[in-house]
Image: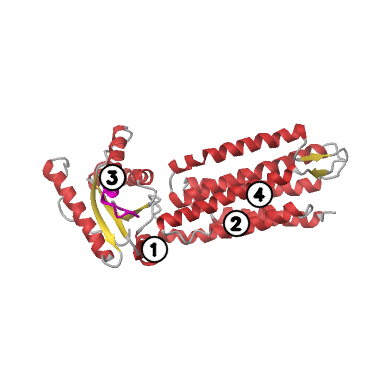
Amino acid sequence: MPNLESIIITNCIGIAVVILTLVSSVETRRSKTPDTRLLTVMLLMIALSCFMEALSYIVDGKTWSSAQALGMLSNTWLYLSTPTFAAIWCLYVDYRMYQSLNRLKRFRPLLMLTGFIWLTIIGNIFGGYLFIIDEQNFYHRLPLAYVYFAIPFLYVGISIADVYGYKRRHGGLSFFPIWVFVILFMIGCIIQASFYGISVAWCCVALAVAGVYMSLQNQLLYHDPLTGLYNRYYLNYMFSSTAWGRSGTHAGIMLDVDEFKGINDRFGHSVGDLALRDTADILKENIPDNSIAIRYAGDEFIVLMRTGDPEEAEAAARNIQNAVQAFNGQNKRVFQLSLSMGLAFYQAGVTSQDRFLEEMDQLMYKDKQKKYEGGSLSERRRERKQPSSTE
């Protein structure tokens, strides 16, 4: 016999955790970036699921006129919300790492699978093959439900593979707390699937998401809030604490937004910020998968690539330039973007970080000078820019 009081208290704790997380993340969520929107959706879904979980036990076996309808509604929602939440979690994990909306298109098959699962669960209302509400308004779980319970574990497995795939390619982001979520999620789901009458799954999920959010605040140190790219702190982290800086030969491209001062002077700093965000978006969408884009200083960016092949590195640089031309061809801004580039190679144990950065900077400056001499840049600002250590 389920202990109704403990079930209500457990799910109220889950709702309280969600409220505290929403309150503590209010400033972060005001940015309305894709990851903060996904976080908000997950938290609201957890709160509603905790409420529905408690409601399903409250109406179980009751003889009210609406008890059977409420039992069917609450249990159907719980079956729908589990795979939906797990799918959103996969999107959240991927975007937090790659900062790319374009990459999320890869999850279309997963979302299609989730839509199919929705249809099968809604069909249960008429077919009664996952669970039923009997004539006495008691809930009964059927054998096929256990197949359904395995589906969220598949989704979570995809998110784990996504994180380790990123680490394999980039050698970084060791601070993404995937196991904080996975362990609590699995404990809650396994206990609830194994023992009817114990309601801990959604409370565990609430604690897991809150733990992930708090752990990810460490990432703010490495994150540029304007562009969504990594910053110079992360550049130093890459060299000092990851395999990228300790082994192999790697390519790097330093990029500078041409005539950026002119954009600021002519259109204002808000438009200048927009130009920086557009540049960052171009880099996010067009650099190779084995690369990381960094906002190095003011209007300067760096792309680090896990390749020592000059042809691959030059192809990446051309791809960025082509993307800039395509952006300009859309005529959706009052300005035109132009990037000067310097491509250099870093050999671990041979090239120092300072020498690598200096070589990229010098080659980028030569590229810019060619544009001045060729007349493609109208602004005659030939002095060398010194990157600010605070940006």
Q: Quadrant of the C terminus?
A: bottom left
The magenta stretch is 300-316
Indicate left or right for 6 with 264 as reference: right
Tell me what residue is drawn at x 25 percent, y 60 percent. Answer: 357
Which disc, if any, is residue 47? Answer: 4
- Indicate which disc residue 8 carries: none
Please tell me how crowded label 2 is: few (under 14), some (14-19), or many (20+) other residues with Cα within 10 Å. Answer: some
* Disc 3 to disc 4: CB gap under 8 Å: no
Mark 3 and mark 2 in contact (Cβ < 8 Å)? no
Is 135 inside the magenta-drawn segment? no
Residue at mark 1 to residue at mark 3: CA–CA distance: 24 Å
Amino acid found under the numbered disc labelled 1 = Ala
Name the side, left or right, on which 321 lies relative to 31.
left
Question: Along the line of sight, which residue is nearer the eye, 193 or 337?
Answer: 193
Residue tagged 1: 243
* Inter-mark Cα distance, 4 to 1: 40 Å
Hey, what amino acid is under mark 3?
Ala
Tell which tag, 4 or 2, sits nearer the viewer: 2
The crowd level at tag 4 (other Cα within 10 Å; few <14, some 14-19, many 20+) is many
Secondary structure category for the residue under label 4: helix
Q: What crowding class fits label 1: few (fewer than 14 Cα within 10 Å), some (14-19), or many (20 or more)?
A: some
- Residue 315: assigned label: 3
The amino acid at mark 2 is Val
- The quarter of the picture where the N terminus appears is bottom right
Q: Position of residue 301 (x, y in %)?
A: 30, 52
The Cα–Cα distance between marks 3 and 4, rounded to whole angstroms, is 48 Å
User: Which residue is disc 2 drawn over?
Assistant: 182
Which comes sooner in the sequence, label 1 or label 3? Answer: 1
Q: Position of residue 331 (x, y in %)?
A: 30, 32
Which quadrant would residue 64 be assigned to in this image?
Answer: top right
Residue drawn 81% across the image and 44% down it: 140
- The reply to whether dot 4 and dot 2 touch (C-beta < 8 Å) is no
